[in-house]
Amino acid sequence: MLTMKKLTLMGAAGALWGLSALLLSPMAHGATYSDTGAAVLVWPKVVVATQRDTVITITNSARSQTAAHCFYVNANSRCSNSLEACSTSSDCFDVASGITGNCVGGWIEVNFDVILTPEQPVAWSAASGLGNSGLSCPGGLFGGSCAKVCSGGSSSGFPCSLPSDCPGGTCQFASNAGTRVPAVGENPFVGELKCIESDPITRLPKACTTLDCNADPANCCRADLEGTAIITTVGGPSSIVDTERYNAVGLRPTGFNNGDRLLTIGGTPPSPTTTCLDLPPETRCEYQPCSDVLVFNHLFDGAVDPISGTFVAESELSLVPCTQDFLTQRIPQVTAQFLVYNEFEQRLSTSRLVSCVLDTPISLIDTVQPNRSIFSAALQGTVAGQTRITGVGGGLIGAATLNLCAPGVPPAAPVCRSTVVAPGGAAYNLNQFADREAADFIRIP
Amino acid sequence: MSTVKGLRAGRIALVLIGMTLTAATVGAEERFTTERPSTVLLFPKVVNTSDTIIQITNTTNLLVNVHCFYVNGQDVGGAPIWQITDFDLVLTRQQPTHWSVRNGRGVNPNDSETGLDPGLVPPVVPGFTGFLACVEVMPSGEPSGANSLKGEATIGEVTTLGAPGNHVSKYNAIGIQACGQGGCGGGGQPVNDDNILELNNVEFAACPGGLLLNFAAENSEDVAIGPTNPPSVVSTNLTLIPCGLDLENLVPASTLQTINLRNEFESPGSVSQVPVDCWFSRDLGDPLFGNEMTIGGLQTFFGSGIIRPAAPGQVPVLGVANVLHMAGDGSSDTAATNLHFCNEPLAPSGCNQVNSEIRLPSLP
């Protein structure tokens, strides 16, 4: 029988549970990074089209040579009848046969390597790629303009000036030899880019057991890569230049990597008092987890732009799953749940399947009628909004774009959707909140 | 009797809360960030030469009070005027809000600004060039440590459709996270109620040891625009503010920085003694940088640099880069980018975290 005292204590404990959960939530942390070096970089939005290109920059912040094993993911949907890229089935009408094909989602992976000399920045155009003639340090006869590094021995990959600086190895000119960045190969192209810091020889993640590179440089897990994307559009109805820039989103190491082809991102700890590093080596986390919630601040679509007072805002959201299987090339699918808050603190929600890559104006996430969308200013009644995005069945990584467009006459969409260039556009990174408990995986061929 | 029971229950409650908080935050990595909710938000570049739109959001389910400070770093007679204008915001749970710094935002439910007005936001003076700092506080005014805020700034000038001078760029606010019990790598403590925010990995995250700047050489050709509309030009404007503020005594913070550079050949370069006095905003082609970051000096299209204090005792800086891309016919656009934080103490980074402070005005 419960006494009053027990009841009081149970009530207090119950209240505590709730209060603790409330207090704890702001302290939880997502663990992907767009503002510091990382071991895996993800560019969630890479686009190439007529008059549009994406310039990728990647920098090695380490004093030693490193490699990035990279994957372009071509997320173009294709017509079932012509295999041409499409966005809707209406793009698949064949005049000759009079048949309209289906627009079927798919993805194609293209992998390549970028060899980075110590502290080297490298950039390339997604439309053109980067061949041997574009390399700063191509090696061979043309390598003399670059600094020297040790090859082999205990100081392999580190800068040197004399042979004696490289015990057991040789001191030779640093080289980007082995770097071949293909062009994305299709116009239009919509997709993503992932780069994994790898051993320059094996092109696999380096096996490591510690984060302390000072104490154990040979066995430490490194996070040396930084990246940005610059999406540039030139031309349009008037001669306009529009540039949008965001930082690549990075995954940092946990302090363990078994060096195999399965990259384990986060994971459920075996008990509440342990971490995913206490799991057996075959399932132990190698990279910090993806975030549980992405926090996306935006202006609602159709809201009058506060800068000009005449143009309207249109935001685009790009999401990609954390989990990807480049070996079997199965299309990764994650359901994104959206909680949308306006400036009245009112909340609406929707969900959308992210199949490989989701790259869409936000007011087309939940409907094909933008003015009826929960991301429409006409429906929400305020200019600014906050959207919290939770991945179900996997983590998500994303970036956003703000476009300012000439207003359309309802129900017509804003003019920026029907023209190549918006009057102004800007990209930015999403915020994040809390860690995912379940693991995500990247499997490389 | 019931009072005694209540006291016991309360005591148990406090112990449990303490245990839970400690367990949950051990190993947490509170830090300077551009992608996580924080207690202090810094918008390094806020201008009224073109307009700037500020967005701030409360990411929690609790009502949040915010105290903000515009700091005018406008240069008058060779010195920043360091004029401060402060105001308060109240954000309900999960509430996003926005305002134009040129116009501010009134408290009027009938005006054109729909949504719950967060408080009276004053407009800045014409020609304002400076930064905005916002601190999450308790209703009574003492600092809070709940890490609830996130923010963005959109800098732009949009005139007519197709105008070559339409420029829009957007960056995330720099957040300073409170450590909380056991946070900041284990040594964190809850925020105390004095007016000094200690950036020391105990109360708040310590300042990053440096900033990493990845840039296109000043006046170089734009890789994307060049083939279509030559000759194109890229120009980067770098905005920096010291990591530390004295908003009580209104003393402008000053520091000296060094920039160590690498081009695509790994060739080193450096710029020494860069003075950051309150608010710094220069193009990379400015004589102050000694031609090191121009296409002529760097000799490759892309470069990277680490911005660090020039000497021990100098505080690091925080900043944002805004890049102008101009085509041959004069049409152009800007794109802002948050700089990467450098916290790697090992060479070549050599970025050791530095303690500093933000001193708020004392409460009456």
Image (cartoon, rainbow, N blue to C red):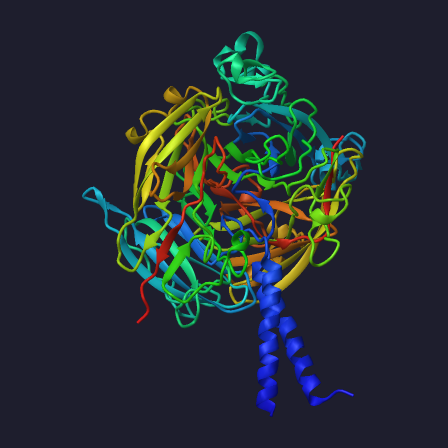
Q: Farthest residue toward the left?
A: B77
- Specify whether A241 is left or right of A438: left
Q: How many marks?
A: 0
Name the residue at 50% across, 10% down.
Answer: A144
In this rendered view, identify the residue nearer to me: B99 or B251.
B251
Q: Farthest residue toward the bottom?
A: B1
Kindly indicate the quadrant of the structure image that contains residue A13: bottom right
Image x and y of residue B342, in percent: 48, 39
- Specify whether A145 is left or right of A99: left
Please tell me whether residue A3 is drawn above or below residue B318 in the rendered image. below
Image x and y of residue B73, in percent: 29, 48
In this rendered view, identify the residue nearer to me: B66 or A299.
B66
Image x and y of residue A432, in percent: 58, 52
The quadrant of the picture occupied by the N terminus of chain A is: bottom right
Please tell me whether residue B361 is drawn above or below residue A112 in the rendered image. below
Whether residue B52 is visible: yes
The quadrant of the picture occupied by the C terminus of chain A is: top right
Image x and y of residue A138, in percent: 56, 14
